[in-house]
Amino acid sequence: MQIRIVVAASENNIIGLDNELPWRLPDDLRFFKKMTLGMPVVMGRHTWESLGKPLPGRLNIVVSSRMEQAPEEGTQVFSGLEDALDYLRGQEYEEVAVIGGGQLYHAALAYTQVVYLTRVHTVLEKGTAFFPVLPPEEWQLTWEERHEADDKHLYPFTFQKWERK
Ligand SMILES: NC(=O)c1ccc[n+]([C@@H]2O[C@H](COP(=O)([O-])OP(=O)(O)OC[C@H]3O[C@@H](n4cnc5c(N)ncnc54)[C@H](OP(=O)(O)O)[C@@H]3O)[C@@H](O)[C@H]2O)c1
């Protein structure tokens, strides 16, 4: 089973502020949907709380040691990331997407083969959640496509695909 991470991070690796996204980038949300549709999405409890409802068309897996039961239909809760991944392997999924937030990305990176990183071209001053640095000796950039700022997108950004060497 392949594990992909899908994330958007500023130049200084900030991904969240006060349990929300630090920006509104509709074309990145569209890209996120394309990169996750049809596969299970795995998220930490804070990200679940920030979404507030399951992402449609995808099995939503929440990792939490505190939540006891699945909050809504279409979601499942596991007390650890490894338990969640073992369950998904048993269901014979070919690929799953880890969709945040900071804590879950840090825990999942070791199991991950591909990272779809939207690099948002700004250095933010404040952040409360972070993406780990991808060590260049372990990861190579295999594709990228730039998106300029416009009236709907305050910052320019670049979609990047990173693959484990
Ligand atoms: N820019 C992006 O692409 C992106 C994507 C997603 C989220 N975000 C942002 O990221 C922020 C949230 O990130 P976060 O780091 O605060 O929280 P998070 O990773 O979403 O959730 C953390 C919680 O998940 C559970 N958890 C995480 N890893 C675990 C593990 N290995 N084993 C067991 N439980 C684990 C724990 O829940 P319990 O305390 O219940 O045990 C932990 O308190 C928000 O601001 C959100 O908007 C950004």
Image: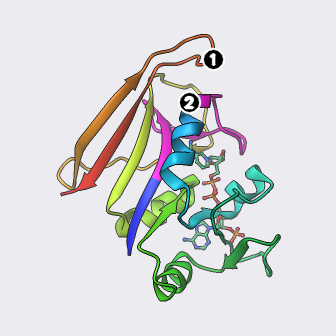
Q: Is residue 131 visible?
A: yes
Q: How many marks?
A: 2
Q: Which residue is mark 2?
A: 27
Residue at 57%, 25% (x, y): give it. Answer: 125
Give the number of the disc on residue 152.
1
- Residue count near mark 1 (Cα–Cα under 10 Å), binned few <14, some 14–19, many ≥20: few
Q: Is residue 16 magenta?
A: yes
Secondary element type, mark 1: loop
> Is residue 60 shown above or below 37?
below
- Residue count near mark 2 (Cα–Cα under 10 Å), binned few <14, some 14–19, many ≥20: few
Task: Name the residue type under label 2.
Answer: Asp
Task: Name the residue type under label 1.
Answer: Lys
Residue at 49%, 89% (x, y): give it. Answer: 90
Please tell me which of labels 2 and 1 falls first in the chain: 2
Secondary element type, mark 2: helix
Residue 148 on image: x %, y %: 45, 16
